[in-house]
Image (cartoon, rainbow, N blue to C red):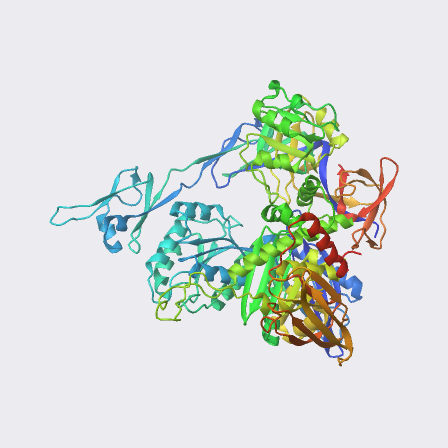
């Protein structure tokens, strides 16, 4: 079997070839070409054809017909063509949505979760209590040019007035769709079912293409995002994609519905987390935005941090984090005025790449801050349902948990997956691992991997048509295991003993001692433990420090090797860098040396 | 492969420039095909939908929303002014009537018996589209706008702030590599498009704003000075809507950098002519660069250009500009395009090219770090 998959990104279209060889699916070739959604080409299929042509040249199979279409095989014995073609897309800015709900912390947040989970960029969230006056909300709605709108509000059988009021604000504001002209703005209603009649009257006129699905918050205690997410996908295909240049042709080529890229990434991560019963944090840091995904206890969350990215948005990262925060990760002398101008030059010429080591060090410092800020936003969003009645004691039986508890527990992360240019293309895998550790501050035992060539979107769609192929390629070719981070939670004292460790194992497991040692507070150490090796790592933390079993309690776990190995991080959590610039610079240089970051 | 496509900025002594001047919503076109227009002439006009003012009338009256329609004193479509009574309760035996007045002026658009809310639609603001460049109307798009065409000296900048503006072009710098200083700006430059050389200094920008200069064009600007002008640190390069009273445009980038001699000479030669400048920059999918258009007499090149991104072929002999440190701003000619990726100083592997620079030396840089420089 031969599968061609493409991901049409905003700048590049990436094609991969997956082949079944000796009964196992493997990713064999990769090609890429500039995306051709914009003028002067204005036809996405040109970029697809170009990227698949590169696959054709590399693989030797004829995949593109003379008319530019993808050749299909009639039987497995045909030499040319493929058996399956699938695609994802985030070209042209991806799927842009406006969401609305009655209460910001409840139905509006559930609506936002549904939209993000479907792979959308949420342009704004309108809620009755979002502290804006009605005319300000209307003004905002009129400024936005979304691809579609999702409206929620009210629990089933509850009060209808508020959600109808919300609809009565949105309808006369007449939000204009991005594609303009005769395009009817798709509006999905996923709120109180009692309000459906009034909602139909409100949006039934010209200008809106209304569809109604089950309430995404039927009760306060329950979220039901599935129907809204599915409808978003359908509308994405029926309306948004159908209006994007060349997508009608692309859809006719594909064997499965075209998915928004982040939606596909979310799907594959959920499949993995559920299949292995683990908690996963994934990140895709791009030029303009950073996407974060997590699955904790089976609950999936996705956030998009608009304007946190490494090229278009690099200046925004520096502005939001502050240059001092960026430079704390740098061990070299750098002139701030010069750096600020360089940041702006990267912003206006986003496709350039660091040529010197100094430029690389700086960009990787910026990436730590972009990832850190994106993770903070993700933790604040990925929470238990807000507004749910807690029945703990008689005293607080009726109190509303307005805050919601973050589901993201750094101690509970089993696997962190890195993807996106600055992480994927770092010259050394050690750099990728350290960027992830510095930004996300995992606690206890955490495995770190990177998406080798950003294949997760392709595999997300593939999972919907051939789950076995998707899983086999994911396990064998998609993820590169970098290794493990072991870090105690708690405050360490510089120079004082923090933990002891013993690592045993080898190519076929066993008890042979690989390394043992002691780390003091503020120290990091790298123990090489290659890919294919497995063994046991025992860590004995000092009193007050926790590596997963409680303060001062030892933990022994089975681990697998990785291209980097085992990083033991005794800097403590939360991570505090020395405040004195000279001490900090020397500490950062020490960590980089210990981990062989820049050679 | 010894060829590749790379982006570049267009700088040309003569092109046929077309400006599409369209209304955001349909309206009236004020000129006809073949008309000669000046930059400030209104070519199309429309009225936008008025603002929406929701008023919770049932709540104000203390009645059930269902009762509201029969209590209304105004019907949908009626004009209302601030203070006009909108609805009145029946009272008790005709007494104790409560009246609710409008807090907004406009037309009563809707009355909801579900929520008790009424919507007042405010007056329609007018939107006018001007020609932006002096030229001839070559196409009228019914109810939407026109296409204005002219022969022009044309240069794309790399970054700008502030929107469309026009005025006579005045040379203020002493050369392409001279910083634009406070003393270079004089009172006589009010309303002018001022051409600087290298970096526009903070003093020059401040003085230009005091004098009322329409736009400043220069090679570079310091990030710190841009922050002072804007009042905030620019996060993403999507500009053009700033209300600064001045348009700033840089041709090369941030920092101490001279304007490319060719660009400078070309623009300086148009001194005294009316120029149109747009600082709007959008560096996202669908790149938009700021531009300088100086209409000139005579025919164009036949090639029609309307702004937007350009790209061209990169091969041995192509003139390029290096756009990343450590050689930022250096101009040269491609002398080799090795096929195999090379290891950079950063440790990354990337496809590179060799550039012969003007001092006779050669440097190797990633292909991603150059842009075409020429026509």
Q: Quick check: can you spot residue A245? A: no
Residue sitting at x 57%, y 39%: B232
The location of residue A197, given as percent across then percent down, is 35, 61
Left or right of residue A332, residue A457 in this image: left
Q: In the rendering, at what x and y percent does residue A33 appear?
A: 72, 55
- Residue A81 lies, with reference to residue B287, above or below; the image says below
| Residue A279 shown left or right of residue B54 in the figure | right
Q: Is residue B157 visible?
A: yes
From the top left corner, tell me how far across and down residue B193 is, in percent. 63, 26
**Which one is in front, A345 or B151?**
A345
Up the image or down, A70 lies above or below B362; here it is: below
Q: Is residue A461 above or below residue B99?
A: below
Q: Nearer the viewer, residue A405 or A394?
A: A394
Q: Compared with residue A414, is residue B206 higher up or lower down, i.e. above or below?
A: above
Of residues A563 and A139, the one drawn nearer to the viewer in this rendering: A563
Estimate the x, y position of residue A193 in percent, counting from the top left: 37, 65
Which sits in the foreground, A598 or B4? A598
């Amino acid at each position: 079997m031969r599968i061609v998959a493409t991901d049409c990104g905003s700048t590049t279209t990436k094609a991969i070839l997956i082949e079944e060889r000796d009964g196992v699916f493997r990713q064999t070739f990769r090609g890429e070409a500039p995306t051709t959604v914009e003028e002067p080409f204005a036809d996405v299929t040109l970029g697809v054809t170009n990227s698949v042509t590169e696959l054709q040249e590399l693989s030797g199979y004829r995949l593109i017909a003379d008319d530019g279409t993808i050749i299909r095989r009639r039987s497995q014995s045909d030499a040319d063509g493929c058996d399956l073609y699938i695609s994802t897309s985030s070209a042209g800015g991806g799927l842009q949505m406006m969401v609305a709900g009655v209460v910001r912390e409840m139905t509006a947040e559930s609506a936002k979760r549904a939209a993000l989970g479907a792979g959308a960029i949420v342009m704004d969230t309108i809620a009755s209590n979002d502290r804006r006056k009605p005319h300000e909300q209307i003004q905002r709605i009129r400024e936005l040019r979304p691809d579609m709108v999702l409206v929620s509000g009210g629990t089933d059988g509850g009060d209808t007035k508020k959600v109808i009021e919300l609809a009565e604000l949105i309808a006369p504001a007449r939000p204009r769709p991005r594609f303009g002209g005769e395009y009817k703005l798709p509006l999905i209603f996923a709120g109180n079912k009692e309000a459906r009649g009034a909602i139909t009257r409100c949006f039934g006129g010209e200008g809106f293409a209304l569809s109604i699905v089950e309430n995404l918050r039927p009760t306060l205690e329950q979220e039901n995002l599935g129907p809204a997410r599915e409808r978003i996908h359908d509308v994405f295909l029926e309306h948004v994609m159908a209006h994007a240049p060349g997508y009608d042709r692309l859809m006719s080529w594909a064997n499965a519905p075209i998915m928004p890229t982040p939606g596909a990434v979310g799907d594959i991560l959920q499949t993995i987390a559920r299949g292995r019963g683990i908690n996963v944090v994934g990140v895709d840091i791009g030029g303009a935005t950073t996407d974060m995904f997590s699955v904790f206890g089976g609950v999936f969350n996705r956030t998009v941090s608009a304007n946190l990215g490494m090229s278009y948005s690099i200046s925004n990262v520096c502005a939001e984090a502050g240059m001092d925060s960026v430079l704390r990760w740098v061990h070299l002398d750098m002139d701030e005025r010069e750096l600020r101008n360089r940041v702006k030059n990267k912003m206006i010429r986003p496709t350039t790449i660091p040529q010197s080591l100094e430029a690389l060090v700086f960009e990787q410092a910026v990436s730590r801050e972009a990832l850190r800020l994106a993770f903070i936003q993700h933790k604040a969003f990925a929470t238990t349902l807000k507004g749910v009645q807690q029945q703990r004691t008689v005293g607080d039986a009726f109190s509303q948990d307005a805050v919601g508890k973050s589901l993201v527990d750094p101690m509970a992360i089993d696997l962190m997956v890195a993807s996106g240019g600055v992480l994927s293309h770092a010259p050394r895998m050690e750099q990728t691992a350290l960027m992830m550790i510095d930004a996300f501050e995992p606690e206890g035992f955490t495995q770190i991997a990177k998406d080798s060539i950003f294949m997760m979107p392709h595999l997300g769609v593939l999972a919907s048509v051939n789950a076995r192929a998707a899983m086999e390629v994911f396990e064998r070719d998609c993820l590169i295991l970098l290794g493990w981070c072991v870090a105690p939670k708690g405050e360490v004292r510089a120079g004082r003993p923090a933990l002891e460790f013993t690592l045993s194992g080898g190519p076929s497991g066993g008890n042979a001692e690989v390394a043992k040692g002691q780390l003091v507070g503020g120290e990091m150490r790298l123990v090489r433990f290659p890919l294919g090796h497995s063994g046991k790592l025992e860590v004995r933390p000092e009193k007050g420090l926790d590596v997963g079993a409680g303060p001062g309690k030892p933990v022994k776990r089975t681990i697998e090797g990785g291209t980097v190995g085992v990083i033991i991080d005794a800097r403590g959590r939360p991570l505090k860098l020395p405040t004195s610039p000279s001490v900090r610079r020397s500490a950062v240089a020490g960590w980089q040396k210990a981990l062989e970051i820049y050679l | 492969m010894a060829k590749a496509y790379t982006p570049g900025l267009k700088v040309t002594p003569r092109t046929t420039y077309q400006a599409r001047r369209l209304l955001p919503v349909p309206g009236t076109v004020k000129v006809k095909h073949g008309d000669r227009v000046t930059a400030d002439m209104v070519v199309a006009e429309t009225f936008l939908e008025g603002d929406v003012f929701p008023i919770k009338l049932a709540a104000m009256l203390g009645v059930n929303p269902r009762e509201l329609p029969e209590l209304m004193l105004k019907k949908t479509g009626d004009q209302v002014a601030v203070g006009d009574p909108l609805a009145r309760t029946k009272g008790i035996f005709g007494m104790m009537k409560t009246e609710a007045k409008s807090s907004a002026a406009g037309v009563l658009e809707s009355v909801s018996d579900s929520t008790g809310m009424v919507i007042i639609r405010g007056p329609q603001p007018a939107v006018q589209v001007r020609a932006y460049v002096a030229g001839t109307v070559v196409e009228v798009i019914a109810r939407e706008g026109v296409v204005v065409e002219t022969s022009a000296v044309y240069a794309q900048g790399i970054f700008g702030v502030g929107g469309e503006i026009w005025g006579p072009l005045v040379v203020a710098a002493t050369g392409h590599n001279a910083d634009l200083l406070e003393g270079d700006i004089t009172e006589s430059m009010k309303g002018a498009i001022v051409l600087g050389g290298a970096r526009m200094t903070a003093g020059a920008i401040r003085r230009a704003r005091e004098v009322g200069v329409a736009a400043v064009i220069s090679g570079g600007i310091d990030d710190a000075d841009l922050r002072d002008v804007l009042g905030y640190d620019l996060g993403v390069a999507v500009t053009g809507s700033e209300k600064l009273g001045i348009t700033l445009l840089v041709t090369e980038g941030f920092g101490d950098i001279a304007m490319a001699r060719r660009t400078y000479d070309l623009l300086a030669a148009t001194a005294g002519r009316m120029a149109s400048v747009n600082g709007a920059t959008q560096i996202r999918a669908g790149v938009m660069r700021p531009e300088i258009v100086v209409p000139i007499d005579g025919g164009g090149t036949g090639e029609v250009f309307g702004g937007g991104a350009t790209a061209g072929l990169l091969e041995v002999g192509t003139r390029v500009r290096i756009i990343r440190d450590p050689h930022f701003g250096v101009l040269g000619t491609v002398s080799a395009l090795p096929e195999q990726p090379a290891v950079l100083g950063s440790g990354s592997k990337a496809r590179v090219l060799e550039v012969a620079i003007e001092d006779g030396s050669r440097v190797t840089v990633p292909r991603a770090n150059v842009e075409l420089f020429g026509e």
